[in-house]
Amino acid sequence: MSNSISPDLNLRPAKPDDAAMLAEFAELSFRDAFESVNTPQDIELYVADAFAFETLQQILLDSDVETVICLAGNELAGYVELWSTPGPDCIAEQDLLEIRRLYVGKSWQGRGVAQELLAAAKAAAQRRHARALWLGVWEHNPRAVGFYRKCGFVAVGTHPFVLGTDQQTDLVMSCRVEELNLD
């Protein structure tokens, strides 16, 4: 995997020994994005489970999950987590690949890292013969919703997302692989 955003950046598949780095990065990225708009209790409950070292290690060992990391030297700039899971009923397409997480570090946002990670997701979808990508994104995250729309994703429904004890609503968005816009 290569990229065009900087000669100092490298995209590669994550390995089980990346679990600690991913756990720390994911928690920090999640807190940066959502801590100011959710209760501290709900944030703590969510990150304690979702980003625990053991949780990330199990994900990295799961053959149905592909995780690609973007490194700037030894610094993690972002990652994408792709799951071979069926989509919700609101997605008509079959043969799907879910983008469960696409996180970019705060200092790397707006610098093309997310597009490179989406390009890696597209390549994974093509290898796995998936016809479409889908994801859930919080309805109150306009920056992320706008980014995905710009890339060709369309909102096709909603599903619940539980953050600690707070049941929130995610938009379900999907995009046919050949229609993904990475410009």
Image (spheres, rainbow, N blue to C red):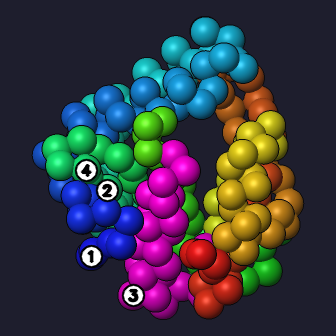
Let me know if residue 131 is in the magenta part.
yes
Give the residue drawn at x 48%, y 54%.
111
From the viewer's perspective, is the residue at label 1 or at label 4 nearer?
4
Q: Which mark is residue 127?
A: 3
Cα separation, mark 3 vs mark 1, equals 13 Å
The amino acid pointed to by label 3 is: Arg
From the viewer's perspective, is the residue at label 3 or at label 4 nearer?
4
- Measured along the vertical axis of the image, is residue 140 above or below residue 12? above
In which image quadrant can residue 33 be found?
top right
Give the residue drawn at x 68%, y 49%.
144
Q: Earlier in the sequence, mark 3 or mark 1?
A: 1
Give the residue drawn at x 55%, y 50%.
110
Res 82 visible: no
From the viewer's perspective, is the residue at label 3 or at label 1 nearer?
1
Q: Earlier in the sequence, mark 3 or mark 2?
A: 2
- According to the picture, the residue beneath numbered tag 1 turns out to be 1
Cα separation, mark 1 vs mark 2, equals 10 Å
Q: Residues within 10 Å of mark 2 (few under 14, many from 20)?
A: many
- According to the picture, the residue beneath numbered tag 4 turns out to be 72
Element under disc 2 = strand
Q: Residues within 10 Å of mark 1 (few under 14, many from 20)?
A: few
Q: Which mark is residue 70?
A: 2
